[in-house]
Image (cartoon, rainbow, N blue to C red):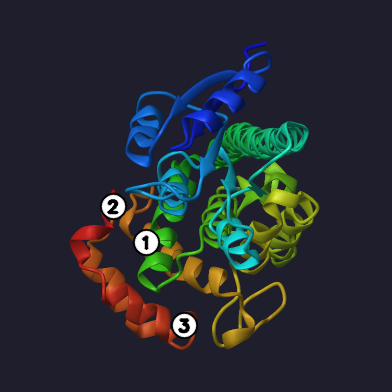
Amino acid sequence: MDKPRILIVDDEKAIRDILSHALRTRFEIAVTENGEKALSEIGSSSFDLALLDIQMPGMDGIQLLEQIGKRSPDTAVVMISGVNEVETALDTIQKGAFDYITKPFSLHVVLSCIDRALERRRLILENRAYQQNLENLVDERTRELQDTLGRIETIYDETIKALGVALDLRDSETEHHCLRVSSFVLKLARKMGLTEEDRLRDIEWGAFLHDIGKIGVPDSILMKPGKLTEEERKIIQTHPVLGYQMLRKIPFLKGAAAVVYSHHESYDGSGYPQGLQGGDIPVSARLFAVADTIDAMTSDRPYRNALPIEEVGRELKKLTGKQFDPKIVDVYFSIPSTEWSI
């Protein structure tokens, strides 16, 4: 292990010689007779500790102490003075010195003071290194956690997309409907001022999976070409409840489940399955109602071609306050019609 490096600064040659002779067996020593030369030494090399005389011509020891604190704050400093004044001693301690030794001094006292100063310096540096290593470790673990969460989120997204594809395959008349309506509902939500990422994700996923409950509806009813009987209509109207029951127990889809459960509610209370009215309907479901209508009207269907976007506006106005929340209809009209194509 390298010897600790000590700088001795004293205008008395005898003091410099005594200290350097006594310390050189244990330490690597450099000596200088004034503050200016001491700063030059510190500028060109690093020292573990400095022994500073207080009363020197030119820059005195206290001024030198302040400069060392600015230029080499990790250097421990012990002051040496021929003046035994409590105020001077306290002043040097307040300015960063470890200790204060008066002349004439005992070499045993000097060595003991140096050992304590170096030990304190070692503990400070080790604690700093520990803190830095701890911060680096926390940063590393945080990055690992973020990477893991990113991978999990990707898996979530892929899972949801796969479910959406499954829904599209069961209902070829509305191919890519899930993708379009989730895009539309996000546009409305952001325009409405919703910015929280978790909430937007719940709205997007809920819109994407709004018909997931149709997986539980028999194909004979879901794909029936003719008109449904009253009993069949009641069965197909259970799909919001079935979808909600499927999603509510999945932690990352719990927020999306609210859209699934309420996407057939109407603003005037005439919807299903709960007959909710007005503000009792989750805002995500009220947003979905408008988004779903946009897609339904502007998409090609077997029985008609896609309608122009102007028809959507007329339909929303006609059913404002009945099927649709008036505030969200206003949000729709605040968006230029050219932005509704994807």
Per the image, the residue denoted by label 3 is 325
Residue neighbourhood size for the residue with mark 2, other residues' Cα within 10 Å, grouped as few (<14), some (14–19), many (≥20): few
Instruction: From the image, state whether disc 1 or disc 2 is nearer to you.
Output: 1
- In the image, 59 versus 76, the foreground residue is 59
Question: What residue do we see at 46% from left, 50% from top?
Answer: 55
Percent x, y of residue 135? 62, 39
* Alpha carbon separation for disc pair 1 and 3: 16 Å
Query: Few, some or many C-alpha atoms within 10 Å of disc 1 (few <14, some 14-19, many ≥20)?
Result: some
Left or right relative to 67: residue 155? right
State the image quarter where residue 4 is shown: top right
**Which residue occupies the foreground of this view, 39 or 85?**
85
On the image, numbered disc 2 is attached to which residue?
A: 305
Q: Residue at x 61, y 19 (%)?
A: 21
Mark 1: amino acid = Lys
Residue 84 point in image, percent of width and height: 64, 58
Q: Secondary structure at mark 3?
A: loop
Label 1 or label 2, whichever comes before in sequence order: 1
* Residue kind at label 3, given as amino acid type: Asp
The N terminus - image quarter: top right
Q: Amino acid at mark 2?
A: Asn
The residue tagged 1 is 187
**Of residues 81 and 299, the one drawn nearer to the viewer in this rendering:** 81
Asked which quadrant contains residue 35, the reply is: top left
Mark 2 or 3, nearer chain start = 2
- How far apart are labels 1 and 2 at the CA level? 24 Å
Secondary structure beneath dot 1 equals helix
Side (left or right) of 149 relative to 8: right
- What distance separates the C-alpha of mark 2 from that of mark 3? 27 Å
Using the image, determine if residue 81 lies above or below residue 75: below
User: Would residue 192 appear left or right of 107 to someone viewing this image?
Assistant: left
- Tell which circle, 1 or 3, labels the residue nearer the N-terminal end: 1
